[in-house]
Amino acid sequence: MKKYYFQRYNYFSKFDQGILMDKEGWFSVTPEKIAQHIATRCQTDIIIDAFCGCGGNAIQFALTCRQVIAIDLDPVKLHCARENAKIYGVADRIEFILGDFFKLAPTLKADVIFLSPPWGGPAYMNQEVYNLKSMIPGDGFKIHQIASQITPNIAYFVPRNTNPQQLAQLAGPGKTCEIEQNALNGKVKALTVYYGDLIDVNKLKSIEAEIAEEELVQQIMQY
Ligand code: MGP
Ligand code: SAH
């Protein structure tokens, strides 16, 4: 736990104002700067944070979106998230729901869904290449599939060593996704994978143009 405590201000800049976290919360919370960035990318009307934990992401979504639906199975996490949201002055912008995302999903409507499920604890790094099927509630494929019945606009927060082929597979045949590395102080902490309208099309176009240019150069060199 020590290494997480040393990073406390990375997790919540207002840590000293009474931030609450339980054990799982400490090792799962999204660092504030990364959560801020994801919230900017996910700016929308209604967003669901399907696995809200102690609120690291939900608080930032409340600052960029009109309404946040924050779900967690664990009442302790939900209590922490609500208290933490009060510290950031955004509790009134978040609807907290105690429940199982899988059971609630058919009743939910939103423009964007953010998924940051349990990865199986800090041992996720013991796998050289993280298999999405190792996610704890069900598996990572099922989580994405259930979310995609609500909206195709999904941001999926996954381990930095996740198998990229699996992430691409989730986009569906002929479709694409954007895999973003989230770094803090020069170190990659996790990946956020964007699906649907969350993909930055301009970035994609410039990458495609770069690849086309490189191919052209290769052809000229061969000639
Ligand atoms: P980490 O690798 O356990 O910690 O998690 P650390 O100390 O930042 O990295 P290290 O390489 O220096 O040891 C990195 C980040 O991943 C955490 O800050 C969380 O944002 C996220 N994270 C970690 N775990 C185990 C989970 C998880 O189970 N679920 C979710 N949603 N995020 C997690
Ligand atoms: N993004 C959060 C951390 C999420 S940790 C933050 O920044 O604070 C993952 C959370 O998923 C845990 O709090 C766990 O209680 C919750 N969870 C696990 N299974 C769930 C389910 N079936 N439905 C809803 N929440 C679940």
Image (cartoon, grey):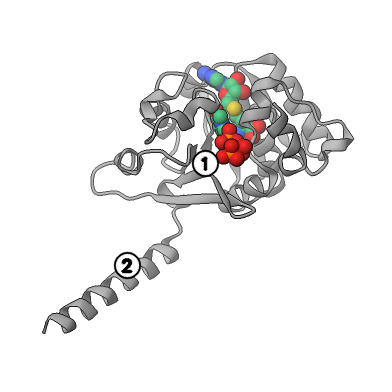
Question: In the depicted view, which residue is nearer to us: 178 or 111?
Answer: 178
Badge 2: few (under 14), some or many (20 or more) residues near its Cα, within 10 Å?
few
The quadrant in which the C terminus is found is: bottom left
Badge 1: few (under 14), some or many (20 or more) residues near its Cα, within 10 Å?
many
**What amino acid is found at the position of numbered circle 2 in the picture?**
Glu
Q: Which quadrant of the render holds ligand 1? A: top right
Which residue bears the numbered disc 1? 112
**What amino acid is found at the position of numbered circle 1 in the picture?**
Val
Q: Tag 1's secondary structure? A: strand
Q: Position of residue 92 (x, y in %)?
A: 78, 34
Residue at point 57% right, 50% down? 187
First of labels 2, 1 by sequence position: 1
Residue at point 67% right, 26% down? 25
Q: What separation in Å lies between label 2 and label 1 (alpha carbons)?
A: 26 Å
Q: Quadrant location of residue 77?
A: top right
**Nearer mark to the viewer, of 2 and 1:** 2
Q: Position of residue 139 (x, y in %)?
A: 39, 23
Question: In the depicted view, which residue is nearer to us: 122 or 175?
Answer: 122
Q: Tag 2's secondary structure? A: helix
Residue at point 42% right, 50% down? 179
Which residue bears the numbered disc 2? 208
Question: In the depicted view, which residue is nearer to us: 1 or 59?
Answer: 1
Are the residues at dot 2 and dot 1 in contact (C-beta closer than 8 Å)?
A: no
The quadrant in which the N terminus is found is: top right
Specify whether residue 183 is in view: yes
